[in-house]
Image (cartoon, grey):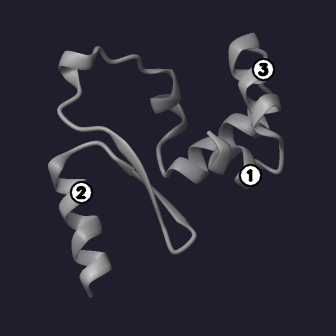
Amino acid sequence: MKDLAFDLGISDIGLLKSLKGGNIPLSRLIRIAEILNVEITELFVEKSTSEMELFGIVRYRGVTYNIDSIETLQELVEDVNS
């Protein structure tokens, strides 16, 4: 959350308040999706823990990666190794 808030140029408390309040400007949602490297619609898809085989956010050399499968994790490892 702190990294995401930093990338957005706001405080982590400000980000938390806006997420809990549910009144987030579209421009901020677009920027969050860009930072997380996901489609904006994925910000609204709720998955149960049992549906998520793998989930994580990895920051490497200033780039944030959304890891949502073994395949995306393997791609990141390959990129890091090359």
Whichever of labels 2 and 3 marks the residue nearer the N terminus, that label is 3
Report, in whole angstroms, how far the alpha carbon at label 1 lies from the one at label 3: 15 Å
Mark 1 → mark 2, Cα distance in angstroms: 24 Å
Picture coordinates of residue 39 (x, y %)?
A: 48, 41
- Residue at x 70%, y 14% (from the top left corner): 20
Between marks 2 and 3, how big is the CA–CA gap? 31 Å
Are the two marked residues, 2 and 3, in contact with CB atoms closer than 8 angstroms? no
Q: Callout 2: helix, strand or loop?
A: helix
Q: Position of residue 70 (x, y in %)?
A: 16, 50
**Residue at screen point 33% across, 18% down:** 47
Q: Is residue 66 above or below residue 61?
A: above
What element does badge 1 sit on? Answer: helix
User: Which quarter of the figure has residue 24?
Assistant: top right
Q: Which residue is mark 3?
A: 17
Q: Amino acid at mark 3?
A: Lys
Badge 3 element: helix
> Which badge, 1 or 3, comes first in the chain's sequence?
1
Name the residue type under label 2.
Leu
Residue visible at 45% across and 31% down? 42
| x, y percent for residue 7 | 71, 54
Mark number, residue 73: 2
Residue in the foreground of this view, choosing between 77 and 42: 77
* Residue placed under numbered mark 1 in the picture: 6
Report the side of 6 relative to 80 (left or right).
right
Crowd class of label 1 (few under 14; some 14 to 19; many from 20; radius 10 Å): few
Whether residue 82 sits left or right of residue 23 in the image: it is left
